[in-house]
Image (cartoon, rainbow, N blue to C red):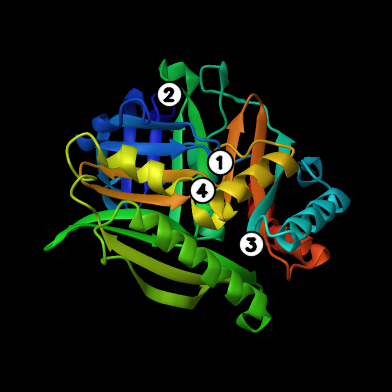
Amino acid sequence: MTGATGWASFDGRVATDAVECVDVLEQPERLETGTWFVVADFEGRARAWRFARVQDADSASAEPSTRWHGPPSETWTSSMGQAAYEAAVERVREYVRDGEVYQANICRVLSAPLPGRVDEAGGAAEPDARALAARLAAGNPAPHAAAVHVPAASGLDPVWVVSASPELYLAVSDGPDGTFVESGPIKGTARTPDGLTEKDRAENVMITDLVRNDLQTVSRPGTVAVTSLLAVEQHPGLVHLVSRVRGTLADDVVRPGELWRSLLAGTFPPGSVSGAPKSSALRIIRELETAPRGPYCGAVGWVDGGRASLAVGIRTFWWADGVLRFGTGAGITWGSDPTAEWHETELKAERLVALASS
């Protein structure tokens, strides 16, 4: 069974049989040979797994070996209740008033007990990430959906992540004039396009500018451009404002051994899930949030030599130690209404948590 040796899926590729894991920050040069599936935690840890078999999704079996059995819906709890979250929003507004930050993304983590299942041999096994991925694909298709599951039984560093991300973090590809890098920041969420506000548009422009600045640290001078601004994208149950930023990577970034060291140093964590200025927003996030984000708001995807596609790890479930977790958050500015921001976090969570519950 693929579950015992690992399984991953992203951007049209399916991989089975994990054979090694590397620390991306310690060995970034390893990602320049072969296909790797990457999971980077918001707090900075980044790992990549190489699999023995990688094939197109159309060629791989589409059916999981088991059905998904999630936690009962009433067992989910939040790292911050409504009163605590609204107080955090007010605190960010104070920081904005004092000129310390323009925007900070404040998140909370939902969690529910989910013990491992019993495998075919009658022993303990981890929940089937492939089954959850299939349920999300049917009920909430996403342009950057991802799953990486390498169980502890594989003997490698374990990981369990299933994401229905709508957001591109980094795409790296070759072009006639060099190696291109592109990002697609999302800011602005509502149930319908009519619900998008001037605050949403201003927030998107602010974060798009931050991402543009990030890409300038790794790109040739004069090549970074906003190719799309404030596009409205439809997703199941909600809409987003999405922009696109593109640049041509600098020669010293694409030299052997340097690509992923430079890209992560210049752009991580993603601007859309941190804030502006990024350094101030990260300090405020550490102060106000009460649970680590882990792979939520980090990155997940694949790297294949000089090409890559990585999603921002939003709309993301992760499992460890008998607990299933899901993160949700909102970007806070001076124009934020605390109750409205709380409801935005509920909107982002409600459909996916319902799908993941039994």
Residue 352 spot, x, y in % from top left: 63, 54
* Nearer to us: label 1 or label 3: 3
Q: Residue at x 51, y 38 (%)?
A: 161
Q: Residue at x 77, y 42 (%)?
A: 76
Mark 1: few/some/many CA within 10 Å (<14, 14-19, 20+) = few
- Farthest residue, direction right: 83
Name the residue beneath numbered marker 1: 67
Q: Residue at x 43, y 52 (%)?
A: 311
User: Is the residue under label 4 in contact with that under label 1 (CB below 8 Å)?
Assistant: no
Q: Disc 2 and disc 1: Cα gap in Å?
A: 16 Å
Q: Indicate the amino acid at tag 4.
A: Gly
User: Observer-nearest residue: 314 or 230?
Assistant: 230
Q: Disc 3 and disc 2: Cα gap in Å?
A: 46 Å
Q: Disc 3 and disc 4: Cα gap in Å?
A: 23 Å
* Nearer to us: label 3 or label 2: 3
The answer to which image quadrant residue 22 occupies is: top left
Mark 4 or mark 3, which is nearer the start of the sequence? 3
| Residue at disc 3, secondary structure | loop
Residue 60 spot, x, y in % from top left: 30, 45
Q: Which mark is residue 4?
A: 2
User: Is the residue under label 1 in contact with that under label 2 (CB below 8 Å)?
Assistant: no
Q: Disc 4 and disc 2: Cα gap in Å?
A: 24 Å
Q: Indicate the amino acid at tag 3.
A: Tyr
Mark 3: few/some/many CA within 10 Å (<14, 14-19, 20+) = many
Task: Give the quarter of the figure containing the C terminus.
Answer: top right
